[in-house]
Amino acid sequence: MTPLPDGLIVVAKRDCPTCQLVEPLLADIERQAGPLTVYSQDDPAFAAGVRGAQYDSTLEHSFRLKTEFVPTLIRVENGEEVERTYGWHREDWQRLTGIQGLGDDLPVMRPGCGSKTLEPGFAEKLELQFGDTHLHAREIETDADDLIEACYERGWSDGLPVVPPTPERVLRMLRGTDRDPAEEIGLVPPDLAPCTVEKVAINAVMAGCKPEYMPVVLAALEAALTEEFGLHGLLCTTMFAGPMIIVNGPVAKSIGMNSGGNALGQGNRANATIGRALQLIVRNVGGGRPGEIDRATLGTPGKYTFCFAEAEDSEWLPLAEERGVPSGNSAVTLFAGEGVQGIVDQKSRTPESLAKSFALALRAVDHPKMAMAGDAVLVVSPEHSRVFIEAGWTKARLLEELEQLLQFPGEEMVAGAGGIAEGLPEQYRDKTIPKFRPGGLLIVRAGGTAGLFSAVIAGWAASGPVGSSPVTREVKV
Amino acid sequence: MTQTSVMLDPTGELSPAVRARLARPESLAGKTVGLLDISKPRGDVFLDRIEERLTEMEVTVKRYRKPTFTRVAPTELKQQIAGEVDLVVEGLAD
């Protein structure tokens, strides 16, 4: 970069009436106030009589001078900027140029216009060309007239259209985090390919994320890449599950996530695209694709995207807090989730009755005769949670009661019992069997305010140390 | 007019940026080969000879024809070919 020219600098554009107002003064300024450089953003003929006039066709000078408005007048001494003013303020222009009486016949003040460098689409292009942000991902050149189709052809899509990851869009996405684009988050299975913040941003663009979702996507990926979560096994399994994200804390509201009506369904951009971004990272960075390493027999629609926020209630401890995140902080909890099984109970008005309904429904996880295989998330709707809260049951109390209710005599559970070959080994016949391993049942509150319905989200049948355990990570905003 | 666009690679960059052609089969034994006549004059002469040679090698041959060389093949025809053969030989010129 060339050092700043000493003297005065004016950045202007023909399109701006205030720049046209000051244009006749520029020759006088050059004559009376010494060296003057004029950068015109749009017209090579602007200030044609001034020796130091230049057409800033690439806008490089305007960008490097961090020009926000035109006209901008800057005084430079010994290569350093000492003062600048925007628009036309007669007093300022007279002081900066040292010319008494400059523009005395002009109005005292006229506001300027926006610099061309800040017009939509320009800022990112200029930053990529002349700025300090350096992207490292390989550039893929294509002559395709439809970039969405080009993404499909390259196998980058989960089946739905993706937003083409142009450098400008990726740069905008990176503005959503302070983290260095080159920072490595971890190795994504199955290829164990290193995933940088930049690769996360590329896939977040494709998923349709807004930049402000980046901290949540990054936390979700960090959680997914932990040893305990066991992403490799999860994505290889013939079973149904995929990574599901539960968001807690203030970030859920600030990025507009849905924890209310249809929280587990479609229609909210943050819910939809954060979950999808994680799955696209698995697909594209990790190389985990169905039919290849992903051997799911049936899969689940949640493998497109599965992400929602908890409808936190002051009476019930939020999931992240239960799992050790300080109150007021945001966090994601990753869970290897299958599908959503509804629990319809419109008649229970006591916590005892409703807990028994929940236990009956939870018994069906994996198979009613299997135990300590899959974890489960119980999603309690506001109307159902009210039954417990009004009776003074905390979330922890409900969990305890459910653990009691979910103990079954081994003789019902062993293979062959009830005329069903599936079941536990014979050695459990005389034992009492808990349905879930310790810590294997999570409770969250979500959903619309009308409806006495809750839901079971079954976990992967290989839950726990053998496969996948739920993992909570704070979101660094 | 086509314009070159740039996208940033979302993958782990473990395979070449320029996509490789599908691997050629090691042998034609047991394969079914489709011969697509694009309806250019005398394309059939070339394809008849290919069919003769393949049949001598005991390769199963199926013949297809585009309605006109001026248009891309109709979707039904492409789907039919994809469903019936392992490989396709396409005559591209006079």
Image (spheres, coloured by chain):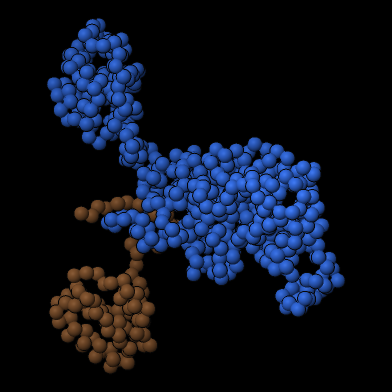
Using the rendered view, name the quadrant where residue A236 is placed: bottom right
Percent coordinates x, y for residue A471 in the rendering: 64, 52
Vertical placement of A34 versus A4: above or below?
above
A377 or A463: which is nearer to us?
A: A377
Picture colour for chain A: blue
Using the rendered view, name the quadrant where residue A318 is placed: top right
Percent coordinates x, y for residue A267 in the rendering: 51, 49
Which part of the image, by quadrant, shows the N terminus of chain A? top left
Residue in the picture at 25% in, 25% down: A16
Picture colour for chain B: brown
Q: Is residue A429 left or right of residue B44?
A: right
A430 or A265: which is nearer to us?
A: A265
Residue in the picture at 22% in, 34% down: A57
A243 or A293: which is nearer to us?
A: A243
Q: Is residue A86 left or right of residue A468?
A: left
Percent coordinates x, y for residue A222 in the rendering: 57, 50
Which part of the image, by quadrant, shows the C terminus of chain A? top right
Residue in the picture at 30% in, 22% down: A112
